[in-house]
Amino acid sequence: MPTDHEPRRKKLKLRAWRRGFREADLILGPFADRYVPDFTESELDWFEIILDQPDQDLYGWILERAPTPPEFDGPLMDRLKAFRDIAHKSGPNG
């Protein structure tokens, strides 16, 4: 029986856009808009845990200024890191 994750998806997208750390918002918000609608349940779990991490830590991992802890490293973090370049090129209105 399929589970409707739409309320959870909306909440995660809102959290991604409203972290209070503008630089992270401008990467995580568009990333969430683009990918969260198609995330599986396990991907939603990962993203939710990622959003619980301190802003400075998460931003450092995304920019590769600090090593990503093994528990967060993997294909989804790789996708997020690759997306930062797309978000940076398109700017806040892109």
Image: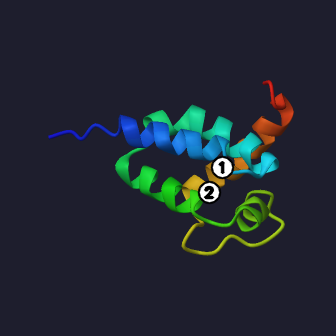
Q: Residue at x 38, y 45 (%)?
A: 40
Q: Percent from the top left, x then y, of residue 15?
A: 58, 46
Amino acid type, mark 1: Leu
Classed neighbour count for the residue bearing mark 2: other residues with Cα under 10 Å, few (<14), some (14–19), many (≥20): some
**Looking at numbered disc 2 in the image, what kind of residue is underneath it?**
Met
How many C-alpha atoms fall within 10 Å of the one at disc 1: few (<14), some, or many (≥20)? some
Q: Which mark is on residue 88?
A: none
**As drawn, 58 above or below 83:** below
- Residue at 47% over, 36% down: 10
Residue 56 vs 3, above or below: the answer is below
Judge by depth and name the residue closer to the eye, 51 or 79.
51
Q: Secondary structure at mark 1?
A: helix
Query: Disc number at residue 80?
Result: 1
Q: Quadrant of residue 14?
A: top right
Instruction: Give the farthest residue toward the top.
Output: 94
Q: Quadrant of residue 75?
A: bottom right
Marks counted in the figure total 2
Assess whether mark 2 and mark 1 are in contact (beta carbons under 8 angstroms): yes
Give the labeled residue for mark 2.
Answer: 77
Assign the N terminus to one quadrant of the image. top left
Figure check: 70 above or below 73: below
- The C terminus - image quarter: top right
3 left or right of 10 in image: left
Q: Nearer the viewer, residue 22 or 84?
A: 22
> Compared with residue 10, is residue 50 higher up or lower down, i.e. above or below?
below
Q: Position of residue 6 (x, y in %)?
A: 37, 35
SS class, disc 2:
helix
Q: Could you say which quadrant of the image residue 38 lies in?
A: top left
Residue pictured at 57% horizontal, 62% vertical: 52
Where residue 70 sits: x, y (%)?
59, 75
Task: Give the spatial CA distance, label 1 vs label 2.
Answer: 5 Å
State the image coordinates of residue 53 (x, y, percent, origin top left): 62, 66
